[in-house]
Image (spheres, rainbow, N blue to C red):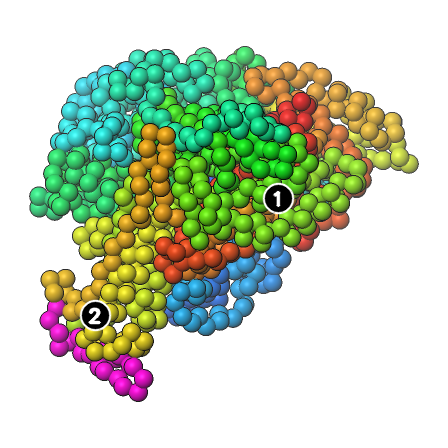
Amino acid sequence: MKVFDYVRPASVAEAIAAAAAPGAVYLAGGTNLLDLMKGETLRPDRLVDVTRLPGLDRIEWLGDGGVRIGALVRNAALAHDAAFATAYPAVAEALLSGASAQLRNAATVGGNLLQRTRCAYFHDPASACNKRQPGAGCDARGGENRLHAVLGWSEACIATHPSDFCVPLAALDAVVEIEGPAGRREVALEALHRLPGDTPERGTALAPGELIVALRLPGEAAGFAAHARYLKVRERTSYAFAVVSAAAALRLEGGRIRAARLALGGVAARPWRARAAEESLVGVEAGEAAFRRAAEAALAEARPSGDNAFKIELARRLVRRALALAVAGTPARIPALPASPFPSVAGARHDA
Amino acid sequence: MTLRLRLNGRPVQAQADPAMRLSDLLRDVLGLTGTKIGCNAGDCGACTVLLDGRQVCACLVPAARAEGCDIRTVEGLAEGGALNALQAAFLRHGAAQCGICTPGMLMAATDLLARLPTPTEAQVQDALGGVLCRCTGYRKIIDAVLDVAGPSPPVAGAMGARLPKVDGPAKLTGAERFGADALPDEAFLTIRAIRSPHAHARFTLGDFAPLLAAHPGLLRVLTAADLPGARVFGIYPTGKDQPVLADGLVRHRGEPVCALLGDAATLAGIPEGDVPVAWEPLPEVTFAAGGPDLHAHAPGNVLCRGLVARGDPATGFAAAAARADIATATGFVEHAYIEPEAGYARRVGDGMEVVACTQTPYMDRDEIALILGIPPERVRVIPTAVGGGFGGKLDLSIQPLACVAAWLTLRPVRMVYGRGESMAASTKRHPARIAAAAAADAGGRLTAFTFHGDFDTGAYASWGPTVANRVPVHAMGPYAVPHVRCTTAALHTNGPPAGAFRGFGVPQAAIAGEALMDMLAAQLGLDPWDIRRINALGEGSTTATGQMLGAGAALPECLDAIRPRWQALRQEASDFNRQAGVLRRGAGLACMWYGIGNTSMSNPSEMVIGIGADGRCTLFSGAVDIGQGSNTIMVQIAAEALGVPPEALNLVSGDTKTTRDAGKTSASRQSFVSGNAARLAGAALRAEILRRANAGPEAMIMLHDGRISVVSGDAATILDPAAMAPDAEGLVLRGEGRFDPPTTALDAHGQGIPYACYAFAAQAALVEVDTALGTVRVLRIVAAHDVGRAVNPTLVEGQIHGGIAQGLGLALMEEYLPGRTDNLHDYLIPTIGDVPEIETILVERPDPLGPYGAKGVGEPALVATAPAILNAIADAIGARLTRVPATPDRVLAALAR
């Protein structure tokens, strides 16, 4: 590990000033950063420790019924906040389906939004990776790419975004509050993560030195609470990244869908909001035919980036399942095995 | 910076780099090595501690984050020197095997129990889901947490007692010393190997002078030119082929080309790219496509072949009413022990002392002697506790480079693998490509079996010959077949060296063989149980090598014991499947057999037990306990033979200077082979004591207050060890035992007696398949195992649970891809949520040759699981997977066919 400079600013302004130095990175929970530093994937010159910045660890309810979540709120604290889980159950379910209890206790909301891809070629210094080293090439294209992107990828990069948390956030119009050298601004979560195009090294819309200070969910999104699910196909029961995941949220009126939200995870370099699929659902009767059309629409542009064609049909099926389960209704409590497409195992449930 | 925190209730102050990992702060600065490092990535949870009462991975907590916080580690659990209730429950239930994950499990459970004193099983699984265990299969850990308030019943007797592990308490308090915990401060010099990023390449080393000049803490760079003795090593005396350091050519990704020697901080600060190595990549020889010869001694890249032939398969196929054919494939599987390889070496006079984790101290000793060019007597190997092995610590790891560096510099040198290095540099399970066929008559009796398996042995030989020889003996499964032809080839590729991994190729073969049994049964309209029972090897059966089996062969009994459970699982699956929907359940059955000990080879074990002048009785056991419990098993058997309670014995374990060669902890041989040596040693000491006391064989021996009482009827004789003359080893009375299983060589057709003892088992699995998404959940496993006699039923169950978990991983999720899965989040092993309820049925029909009838169970536990799960998937979806792991893409592809 490289020898570096460590600063612990007392305010957001100080943090932004400290991060203006070249090679500076923010340190919050550290769950992703320390791992990247070990692998030489990331070699910062300066760590700006934001964990003790005041006021960023609060969950505040807003006038419109929405919520503002400080960037330093821990994943576990948010998932287990009863009011939050009641208003945004799919987000809580996604949080609890990710990583392990240890990591959820340490990881922060802000850091989770900036989680780096798990592409093995990005993490392997011996492999060519345009994301790590622009212009180097992409060894994943001809390599082991069973789990790589099927949407929004480019010849330059086929990596996926690994977050569970971000998938329902994208579906529910979450907004990210950012402070930076140029002042304060807001970005829709959907626009925070960038598709690779020709510049896969730029994974997010953040400018150098910018700091995520909070995440907002609009009150309108709480209107989906009765019919919202997050489902995740994974290759072991717990503590595994998604092969494909889906967040589905519906507002129903007499068997008809009044509003729909749908996003996919594990399929692209960003959580994939499926707007065409949402539109296809509005005003129609909730049922298998509608779900099938929505699934087709959601994956209409999908194409394999390698040995991963199966993910396209798998994603369609997961969309249908997520919509069907959303219609069936949000469970009173989050299942013992969050986001499992299997019926809940008997026994305890999470008290979210 | 100066950090202030509370550690286990006490204020602590330490100097630390703010970005130092909390795990390193605890271990290296504060000296608390109970917190283990398995991955440094938050993937394994071995470093779990409580930070302000909540479980976190200490490896991902920057030290600065811990400032002002309350930290609790495993060292803070014991109360007043005694195990707390949770630790006691772990001990009672056998929840710690190797013990490397145990601190993490205990801390995660402590967090849970503080919030939910009486959790449900699902809550335990949720709370402990971030700690990986490779030994236990998790079931006994769940039992222990659920039974935290339960009583500890007294344990009486030796053989058959559920004796808590003799080394258990140390594993529960953090006191146990694994490879990375045993490093003395003076061994601060560290080795960092520079490894090939290419599977096949020529390379040239550049001038190291600028690197040395730029880094004053870099002492020297070792290259192949520095090696004092043999430049290659290997398992077999002939055919040593694996370079200590490659010399201009690498044959697998991860092969070391040079080694930096210096202090750890200096080495960590040197970017890989600054080390002058010029690479010229070469075309890769793959298992799928082959390629030019990698070794002159292996034309066609064939390392070796194996054969067992009996009768005439053509005749058997011609006479058959049913015939089934199958082609199966498996990939590399990683051992994924949670303890990466670690240890240190130091030169002592003209000799070498190595303290490291290993499964085979005596082989290590001999190999290190060759590498240093000195006689084996001048090498002493002192094994540390082993944090899981499963065959992967039978090959040398850190020893060659640490020893060479210590030898050349005259200074103690340490080497500690990181997770990525451990996975890149260590051996793997052989990928297999199998074509097999079986036939049966109308009554279901097998008439013929043919099998050919190619096994990818990777770049170097390692244990490839063992796999090639063991598989043909076992490939037809535990069934009587008159006409058999089984062949194997171990093929070199530019993959990682494939070596020993729990089962030596037999698990791969069983996937094919047990599928054929179900396919034949389906053709003949027989229940899968019936066709297995009809053909089961039992007492008096003749195997395909022409060996007549004795009274210990108990597969019929295993099948009879499992039958009601099998029928219930079948019924449950068919009841469930009456409802419409995408979920389908299936039940699968598989049998296995496994020869205990090495194949047609002398593999003796020697044990010594003695009494010192102080009256203390000590068992000197060279059998290395890798978590399976051989320390406890040897004590129980020796105590039984001596006629004293196990608590009366002290144990000195596995040190090439102080114990005799007990052979490898491998091939499921320690209970059977070393157990016999322990029994003979105990019996010899008993005979000597009785002779001195002039007492008959029924007399009772009691050790107390430094004296030996021999009671026979109303008469008691007291022997006083203090009055006896000690021998050179300080013993006044001793017994020695040696056992070598009686086997014969196999002839040109593979005929002979390859093993003195076989273990048998039948396992049944109930699975649920989501036919829309291709996911599989195992709902239940029933395992009936012929164990001869359970020396310690808790430990036997623990072996079975752990083997089943590894078999489940093989079936459903594990495949190692060099360079792509060198961590524990891309290489998936089962978590606590993946292992279902397991019912174990111990079939105890004593083996005539076993110690008190006992036989091995370590590998037998794993072999039948993957085939049972795959048969259950086939039952559920009506399509058979022939390639593992059964990931969703493969299940969906099978459904689409």
- Give above or below for B618 relative to A235: below
Residue at image position (30%, 20%) is: B298
Tell me if I can see residue B230 in this picture: yes
The chain that hosts pointer 2 is: B
User: Could you tell me how far apart the alpha carbons at marks 1 and 2 are, in whole angstroms?
Assistant: 51 Å
Q: Mark 1 sits on what residue?
A: B529
Report x, y in % for residue A129. 45, 18
Magenta range is: B708-726
**Element at label 1:** helix
Report x, y in % for residue B361. 25, 46
| Picture quadrant of residue B775 | top right
Report x, y in % for residue B857. 43, 50
Residue at image position (23%, 82%) is: B717
Whether marks 1 and 2 lie on the same chain: yes
Extreme residue in the bottom direction: B714
Residue in front for this viewpoint, B278 or B801:
B801
- Give above or below for B551 relative to A72: below
Placement of the C terminus of chain B among the 4 image quadrants: top right
| Picture quadrant of residue B473 | top left
Q: Which mark is residue B52?
A: none
Q: Name the amino acid, label 2.
A: Glu
- Give above or below for A10 relative to B657: above
Q: Name the amino acid, label 1.
A: Trp
Residue at image position (24%, 41%) is: B364
On screen, residue A152 versus residue B182, left or right, reads right
| Picture quadrant of residue B776 | top right
Q: Mark 2 sits on what residue?
A: B688
Tell me if I can see residue B496 in this picture: no
The chain that hosts pointer 1 is: B
A72 falls in the magenta region: no
**Element at label 2:** helix
